[in-house]
Image (cartoon, rainbow, N blue to C red):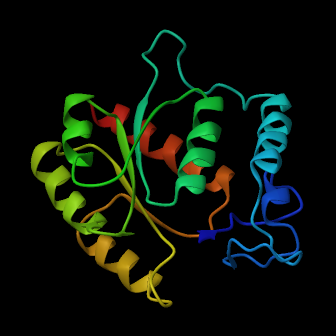
Amino acid sequence: MTACLDPTDDDLLSQLCQDKEPGTVVHESHESSSHLPRSGDIKRASERFLAQPKAQESRDPARATPKLLLIDDDLMLRNVTAMVLRHHGYEVITALGPESAELAVVNDVNLVITDLIMPGYSGLELIEALHRHLPGVPIIAISGGLRGNSEDYLNHARDMGVDAALAKPFRMPQLIEVIEDLLKQRAERA
């Protein structure tokens, strides 16, 4: 199963979730009513997205490219989000599981985006580890929740001190705005 991105008319990837409401879960099925994007759909969406002009660069070109760690068990969402972030000039490392905290430290990341609910691993555990090993690195918690408990998980993450919390589905421009704001705040503190 995979959760749709926010399908709005101006969303560059809305064709991935045609005729679906935000938050709709799609299932793999051989029925004609299935809305699971096929690899060809994803490729066409990617090509259309990459044909769009990049957002205005607000970062100083002399500075190093910000390095982000993206952790999510939803392969399609992780890959699409990474593609969008790379298109906006970020270096993106993707991960899933207990090795995520180590990757953040070893790669000296500037920001972490983590899902909260993943099979066999908790984003909340990762947040604790990141606070211990990389204090000051901004963390964005994302969650679609389990059986509608998304807001409970996001509130718990806020209580743990994450810098931002976004409920799935979120819009990519919203995520990029949050990332830019957090990186700007971190640079001002340095």
Asked whether, in this view, residue 5 is left or right of residue 89, the answer is right
Residue 150 coordinates in the image, percent (x, y): 46, 81
**Residue at left offset 36%, top offset 34%:** 188
The quadrant where residue 168 appears = bottom right
**Residue at left offset 19%, top offset 35%:** 105
**Residue at left offset 36%, top offset 68%:** 116
Q: Is residue 59 positioned above or below 74 on the image?
A: above
Of residue 158 and residue 44, the one placed in the foreground of this image is 44
The quadrant where residue 146 appears = bottom left
Q: Is residue 107 positioned above or below 77 on the image?
A: above
Asked whether, in this view, residue 168 is left or right of residue 119, the answer is right
Of residue 190 and residue 159, the one placed in the foreground of this image is 159
The quadrant where residue 9 appears = bottom right
Residue at the far front in the pictured view: 30
Residue 161 coordinates in the image, percent (x, y): 25, 64
Residue 178 coordinates in the image, percent (x, y): 52, 51
Of residue 136 and residue 166, the one placed in the foreground of this image is 166
Residue 67 coordinates in the image, percent (x, y): 40, 30
Q: Is residue 36 positioned above or below 132 on the image?
A: below
Counting the numbered discs, the total is: 0
